[in-house]
Image: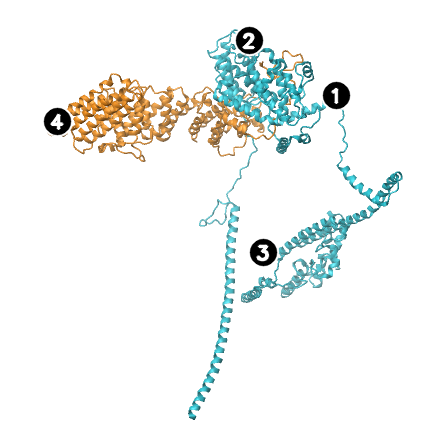
Chain colours: A cyan, B orange
């Protein structure tokens, strides 16, 4: 094709037909032109023709004939209605005949192309576009398939399955009469324009393509027509395809090259190996070439075995003291950060789930096959590993010095508290701790299977023992023993954290049940011990904690529901308040019950139930003397006031309602001050609390809340619409939205169309029915006619015979 | 024993078969009771022999009188001649005095302990009523109800006495009062006439037991004037007067008021009366508003919050359904919000009622704001269960009265409102809410703010904290269903917690600052490691 662009071609075409460049020089000629408008018809036709010829995409040039029977039925001609009806009838008749002919036949033609069967509602153009798309997809999939096959059968060289539209193979298969994409009746692949584009592409960047196209046309950028866009799409996809193809080709070549080179490489390898082998040979005598092969096979297997071998790992560097410190600090920081996240209740959910899974997995493995625990990695069998329970050096030494308890092997791990007590019975009380330590060290997890389980159980026993000790012991000196037991317990519980949850929860529940039966039954040192242990071991600042949260609930239940009308209960409440404060040391959460307790307790001191007692030196509350009724009430009061100060400074101070809290407490403090005016130290304490309260109140701006400070949400403003042709008689439904309106409109349309379609169907079926009846009637008629004829024939024949007979008879009679 | 029975049997035979001349034997029979009357304490359920004898005796006597009655010999108006009339009158007299008064009523009144014989007496007495109704009418078959006899029974039951006869009242209620319309009617009417008769103070106004009896008698749902209750008639032919519903209602109302004015009613009884008031009493009264005095008295005189609240509930009912005007209602309700309110056992019932009282959209903003503020103030010392039930209530109130939203959001203090905020930025805000103001209209709570709720957002229980955070979020929810939140308490909370699945292991305390601490103080340690607890030691 000589002319490159559409526009150029168009120009030339127009020139050819004398439609281009006609300018009217004068008015006169213009008028003439108007007069000669009759010519315009011819001209219009010409222009239309040219237009059609230029719009190649609108035209389909059939390279081979379609069996276009059904399409014929659908085509509409522009002739007049009578003709149209005639044509319609003919078309129907034709399709009926075809259908009839095809009835009960398998070799009928079915047009499986997109949009060809049934009602598609697509225009011709849309159909082609859609088909092209499908084709592209199919092609791409095939290509993918091919590529994957290519890689698998690298050496095959030839492709296992050829793509229908493979650019490469097209040349070979041009003649085979395969279907191919055409444009204006020409094959796409020998399109000059396309080649030109490709060339241009090779020269320029891909991004310049559009610009280039614009340049080629007129230099003026304009909106592209659909056709052009289509063209571009096709061209682009072709180009990409080509690029891919090229890439693959080069790769294939490279692979082939490599394959060839590999032989050389092997030869090289063999020679080096040979040399070493030769050396060996020299030592071991001569060997045949066969051995070479064996040796080579050995190489492969060796490589494989090496692959599975453990690789050398870098050893942990010995850290300097400074580095150690830094590391520690970093770790502490990390832990603190984690704690803060937990405090704010932010859990990375994904992580949490993973972690949970991990725990479960470990547990499963742990319980099912304990012998495998070394491999599980949780309890590695390395001495001095983190999993062992190690005690401080000095205690270790202490243990050694005590010679009464030596024989490690003699200790069985007690599984119940009773057993433990009977075991301890044989030793003086000072040695109990070392006995316990012996038991633990003789049951280190690394020593035997099932030790973990035993120690876990033992933790429970120690817990019970602690409670037992706290409830029974009364001596001042035993504090050391207690602390040591607590130490051991903390260490154990840190190790068996996961598995002791249920045990602790059970403990909480049993406490609650006891409390429900009789409120006073839990006023015991062991209760205090339990709560402080929980606070001591666990991170109490967590937003939610499996053990701490239930403990808090329980503490607060006690604080709310105990009757604080006795000194003992007050003392107990004071301790709980202290523990509660300790729990909230970091998270500063507010517990209404503690304020409630403070109020009740202050009321108790204000009331006449408490008599003024002489001033005493401040003393800490003693757990072991919890149930001791002789405690000095003033001391308890001092502790209470101390705890109030603490809650005030630590927790209440931070709350917005601190003024309100102070409003509740302060009047009571004044009353108390009046009552304890004589007791100097108490009075001072009260005054200092009141003073700090005053400063808090005076410093607190106490601004009203702005809890609803959200982004403002705009409310859709619906302005009334004025309808120019408002008709009061018409029913306007303003309630429904435009979308609903549209939906209703479409529904109506669907209804209408389906009705029309039904009508059409009925018409069709009536038509076929008519034809069928006609045929049937014709058939029957033919049959009757035939029969009639036959009968006639017979009748005539018979009649003539009879006549003959009669004649003969008469004749014979006449003869007689 | 057998001798005793034989003796009775011979008397019985002589009376029934021997004719009029042996009628004096009736007196001999009644005399037999005297053995027992010397010592009433021997008539108990344990003393079977005595009991069976005396029961047999009573039974025989009733049979005799029944036989006489069927012969119409107990009704003097049926006498045909003077002689007969004298006889009949005498017989009637023995029946009335010797049998009914001296035996049946005597035993009903005087037996101290609960026993089956007095119950039998009650039954016999009711049978007597039935008998009288049939045979004592002026004419044969005339409609008649022995209301005087009924009166006697009422007096016997409700008379001042030293011992508890509630078992008798209960029996009477169960077997007669609840089942028979005419018994109910005449009971109420006669009761009323008894209480109104001035000269004889037969039924004492202030009695320890009567309120209980009365309560037992009326605390049920099958009443004379109910349309759907299916009641029988006790006597065969009661007078048409019985149809007069108005008379019944009036009597019923009067009797209620009479009983409610009893000054010896205990708080417990008040509570149970108040609980049935709106369902079983108020609808049956002629003028329910007459209860106003009683209810206000209840409120004023009781120190029990429950009684006070229930009284208010009754008042609310009257206001709601019977147009009672009671301007002090919310004033009194407001006074109920004391520090103890949220720590009571029947907290959820309270909250339900409070929700009901405050549901009107026509309440003034000041009033609603006062209630909201007061409630949130109480939350500062409340249990989690109370908090979770009050918070949705406050939410609903705020939703119902959007003007109160200023209590949780004061646009003046939004830092973005530069001009406005600059003015108040550094100024101290003085809370205008007056806690001690009794009148909710005047407390000026609307100009205050709910810092208490903001404080609860850092509640130790994570779920309570997050529930209080609903006030921080946009108010998108229409309202909360209170019922979902009412039944929480420590136990359910704890159960909920303990049921939680173990997802992550409980985190241990890694805080550096507390490392090396001991739980208990270890003398005066040189290296200064502190103990875990400050004020507690071993």
Residue furthest to the front in view is B2
Give the residue number, with chain letter if any, for mark 2: A681
Give the residue number, with chain letter if any, for mark 1: A321
Q: Position of residue A1 (x, y in %)?
A: 74, 60
Splitting the image into 4 quarters, where does residue A162 fall?
bottom right
Of residues B103 and B155, which is closer to you in this image? Answer: B103
- Mark sitting earlier along the chain (1/3): 3
Which SS class for mark 4?
helix
- Mark sitting earlier along the chain (1/2): 1
Which SS class for mark 3?
loop
Which SS class for mark 1?
helix
Give the residue number, with chain letter if any, for mark 4: B85
Q: In screen coordinates, is A413 left or right of B170?
A: right
Give the residue number, with chain letter if any, for mark 3: A120
Gap in Å between the C-alphas at discs 4 and 1?
A: 131 Å
Gap in Å between the C-alphas at discs 4 and 3?
A: 116 Å
User: Few, some or many C-alpha atoms within 10 Å of disc 1 (few <14, some 14-19, many ≥20)?
Assistant: few
Gap in Å between the C-alphas at discs 2 and 3?
A: 98 Å
Using the image, determine if residue B169 lies above or below residue A754: above
Q: Can residue A592 be seen in this view?
A: no
Residue furthest to the bottom in view is A815
Q: Where is residue A718 in the image (x, y as percent from the top left)?
A: 52, 41
Name the mark nearer the viewer: 1 or 3. Answer: 1
Q: In screen coordinates, is A595 left or right of B5?
A: right
User: Few, some or many C-alpha atoms within 10 Å of disc 2 (few <14, some 14-19, many ≥20)?
Assistant: some
| Mark 4 and mark 1 on one chain | no
Q: Are marks 1 and 3 in contact (CB under 8 Å)?
A: no
Q: Where is residue B9 in the image (x, y as percent from the top left)?
A: 20, 25
Gap in Å between the C-alphas at discs 1 and 3?
A: 81 Å
Of residues A807 and A742, which is closer to you in this image? Answer: A807
């Amino acid at each position: 094709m000589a002319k490159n662009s559409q526009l150029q071609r168009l120009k030339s075409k127009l020139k050819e037909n004398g439609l281009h460049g006609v300018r009217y020089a004068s008015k006169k000629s213009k008028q003439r032109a108007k007069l000669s408008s009759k010519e315009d018809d011819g001209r219009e036709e010409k222009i239309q023709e040219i237009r059609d010829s230029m719009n190649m995409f609108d035209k389909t040039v059939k390279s081979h004939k379609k069996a276009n029977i059904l399409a014929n039925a659908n085509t509409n001609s522009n002739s007049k209605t009578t003709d149209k009806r005639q044509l319609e009838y003919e078309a129907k008749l034709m399709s009926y005949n075809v259908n009839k002919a095809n009835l009960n036949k398998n070799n009928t033609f079915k047009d499986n192309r997109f949009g060809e069967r049934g009602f598609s509602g697509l225009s011709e153009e849309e159909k082609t576009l859609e088909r092209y798309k499908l084709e592209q997809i199919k092609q791409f999939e095939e290509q993918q398939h091919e590529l994957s096959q290519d890689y698998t059968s690298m050496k095959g060289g030839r492709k296992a399955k050829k793509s229908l539209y493979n650019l490469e193979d097209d040349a070979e298969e041009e003649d085979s009469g395969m279907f191919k994409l055409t444009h204006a009746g020409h094959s796409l692949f020998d399109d000059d324009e396309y080649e030109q584009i490709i060339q241009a592409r090779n020269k320029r960047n891909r991004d310049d393509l559009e610009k280039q196209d614009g340049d080629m046309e007129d230099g003026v950028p304009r909106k592209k027509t659909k056709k052009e866009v289509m063209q571009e799409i096709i061209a682009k996809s072709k180009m990409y395809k080509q690029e891919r193809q090229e890439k693959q080709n080069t790769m294939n070549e490279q692979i082939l090259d490599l394959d060839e080179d590999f032989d050389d490489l092997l030869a090289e390898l063999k020679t080096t190996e040979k040399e070493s082998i030769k050396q060996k040979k020299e030592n071991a005598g001569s060997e045949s070439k066969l051995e070479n092969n064996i040796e080579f096979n050995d190489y492969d297997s060796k490589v494989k075995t090496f692959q599975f071998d453990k690789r050398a790992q870098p050893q942990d560097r010995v850290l300097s003291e400074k580095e150690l410190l830094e590391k520690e600090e970093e770790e502490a920081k990390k832990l603190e950060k984690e704690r803060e996240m937990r405090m704010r209740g932010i859990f990375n959910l994904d992580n949490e789930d993973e972690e949970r899974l991990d725990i479960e997995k470990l547990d499963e493995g742990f319980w099912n096959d304990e012998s495998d625990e070394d491999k599980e990695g949780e309890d590695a069998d390395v001495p001095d590993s983190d999993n062992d329970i190690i005690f401080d050096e000095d205690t270790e030494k202490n243990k050694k010095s005590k010679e009464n308890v030596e024989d490690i092997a003699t200790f069985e791990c007690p599984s119940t508290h009773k057993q433990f007590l009977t075991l301890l019975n044989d030793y003086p009380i000072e040695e109990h701790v070392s006995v316990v330590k012996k038991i633990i060290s003789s049951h280190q997890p690394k020593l035997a299977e099932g030790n973990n389980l035993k120690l876990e159980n033992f933790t429970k026993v120690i817990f019970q023992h602690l409670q037992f000790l706290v409830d029974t012991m009364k001596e001042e000196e035993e504090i050391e023993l207690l602390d040591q037991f607590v130490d051991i317990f903390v260490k154990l519980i840190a190790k068996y954290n996961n598995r002791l949850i249920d045990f602790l929860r059970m403990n909480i529940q049993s406490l609650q049940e006891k409390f429900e039966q009789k409120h006073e039954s839990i006023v015991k040192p062991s209760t205090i011990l339990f709560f402080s242990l929980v606070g001591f071991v666990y991170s109490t600042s967590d937003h939610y904690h499996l053990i701490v949260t239930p403990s808090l609930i329980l503490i607060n239940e006690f604080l709310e529901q105990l009757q604080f009308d006795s000194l003992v209960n007050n003392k107990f409440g004071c301790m709980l308040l202290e523990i509660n404060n300790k729990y909230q040391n970091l998270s500063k959460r507010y517990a209404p019950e503690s304020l409630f307790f403070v109020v009740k307790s202050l009321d108790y001191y204000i009331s006449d139930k408490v008599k003024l007692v002489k001033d005493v030196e401040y003393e800490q509350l003693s757990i072991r003397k919890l149930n001791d009724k002789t405690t000095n009430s003033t001391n308890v009061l001092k502790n209470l006031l101390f705890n109030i100060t603490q809650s005030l400074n630590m927790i209440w101070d931070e709350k917005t309602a601190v003024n309100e809290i102070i409003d509740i407490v302060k009047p009571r403090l004044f009353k108390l001050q009046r009552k304890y005016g004589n007791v100097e130290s108490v009075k001072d304490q009260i005054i200092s609390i009141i003073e700090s309260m005053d400063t808090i109140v005076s410093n607190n701006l106490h601004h009203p809340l702005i809890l609803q400070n959200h982004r403002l949400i705009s409310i859709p403003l619906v302005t009334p619409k004025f309808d120019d042709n408002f008709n009061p008689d018409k029913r306007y439904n303003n309630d429904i939205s435009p979308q609903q309106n549209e939906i209703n409109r479409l529904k109506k349309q669907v209804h209408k169309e389906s009705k029309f379609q039904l009508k059409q169907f009925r018409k069709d079926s009536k038509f076929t029915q008519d034809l069928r009846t006609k045929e049937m009637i014709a058939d029957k008629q033919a049959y009757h006619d035939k029969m009639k004829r036959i009968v006639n024939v017979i009748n005539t024949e018979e009649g003539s015979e009879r006549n003959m007979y009669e004649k003969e008879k008469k004749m014979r009679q006449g003869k007689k | 024993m057998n001798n005793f029975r034989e003796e009775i049997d011979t008397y019985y035979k002589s009376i029934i078969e021997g004719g009029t001349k042996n009628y004096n034997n009736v007196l001999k029979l009644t005399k037999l009771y005297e053995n027992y009357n010397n010592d009433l304490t021997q008539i108990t359920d344990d003393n079977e022999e005595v009991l069976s004898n005396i029961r047999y005796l009573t039974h025989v006597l009733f049979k005799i009188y029944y036989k006489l009655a069927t012969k119409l010999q107990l009704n003097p108006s049926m006498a045909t001649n003077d002689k007969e009339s004298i006889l009949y009158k005498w017989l009637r007299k023995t029946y009335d005095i010797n049998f009914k008064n001296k035996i049946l009523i005597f035993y009903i009144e005087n037996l101290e302990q609960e026993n089956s014989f007095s119950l039998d007496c009650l039954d016999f007495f009711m049978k007597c009523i039935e008998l009288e109704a049939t045979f004592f009418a002026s004419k044969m078959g005339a409609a008649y109800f022995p209301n005087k006899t009924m009166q006697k029974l009422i007096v016997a039951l409700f008379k001042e006495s030293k011992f508890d006869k509630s078992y008798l009242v209960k029996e009477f209620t169960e077997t007669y009062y609840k089942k028979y319309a005419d018994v109910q009617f005449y009971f109420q009417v006669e009761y009323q006439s008894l209480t109104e008769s001035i000269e004889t103070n037969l039924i004492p106004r202030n009695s320890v037991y009567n309120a209980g009896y009365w309560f037992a008698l009326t605390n049920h749902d099958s009443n004379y004037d109910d349309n759907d209750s299916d009641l029988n008639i006790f006597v065969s032919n009661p007078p048409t007067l019985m149809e007069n519903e108005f008379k019944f209602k009036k009597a019923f109302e009067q009797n209620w008021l009479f009983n409610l004015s009893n000054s010896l009613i205990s708080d417990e009884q008040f509570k149970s009366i108040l609980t049935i008031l709106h369902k079983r009493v108020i609808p049956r009264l002629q003028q329910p508003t007459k209860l106003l005095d009683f209810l206000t008295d209840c409120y004023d005189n009781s120190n029990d919050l429950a009684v006070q609240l229930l009284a208010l509930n009754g008042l609310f009912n009257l206001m709601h359904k019977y147009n009672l005007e009671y301007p002090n209602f919310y004033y009194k309700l407001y006074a109920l919000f004391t520090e103890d309110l949220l720590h009571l056992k029947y907290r959820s019932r309270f909250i339900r009622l409070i929700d009901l009282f405050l549901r009107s959209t026509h309440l003034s903003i000041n009033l609603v704001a006062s209630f909201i503020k007061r409630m949130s103030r109480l939350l500062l010392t409340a249990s989690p269960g109370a908090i979770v039930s009050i918070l949705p209530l406050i939410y609903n109130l705020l939703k119902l009265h959007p003007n109160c939203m200023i209590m949780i959001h004061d646009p003046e203090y939004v830092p973005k409102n530069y001009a406005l905020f600059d003015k108040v930025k550094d100024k101290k805000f003085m809370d205008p809410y007056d806690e001690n103001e009794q009148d909710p209209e005047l407390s000026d709570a609307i100009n205050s703010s709910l810092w208490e709720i903001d404080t609860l957002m850092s509640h130790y229980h994570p779920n309570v904290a997050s529930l209080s955070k609903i006030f921080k979020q946009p108010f998108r929810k229409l309202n909360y269903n209170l019922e979902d939140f009412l039944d929480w308490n420590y136990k359910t909370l704890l159960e909920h917690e303990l049921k939680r699945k173990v997802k992550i292991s409980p985190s241990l305390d890694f805080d550096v600052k507390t490392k090396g601490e001991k739980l208990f103080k270890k003398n005066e340690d040189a290296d200064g490691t502190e103990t875990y607890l400050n004020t507690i030691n071993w």
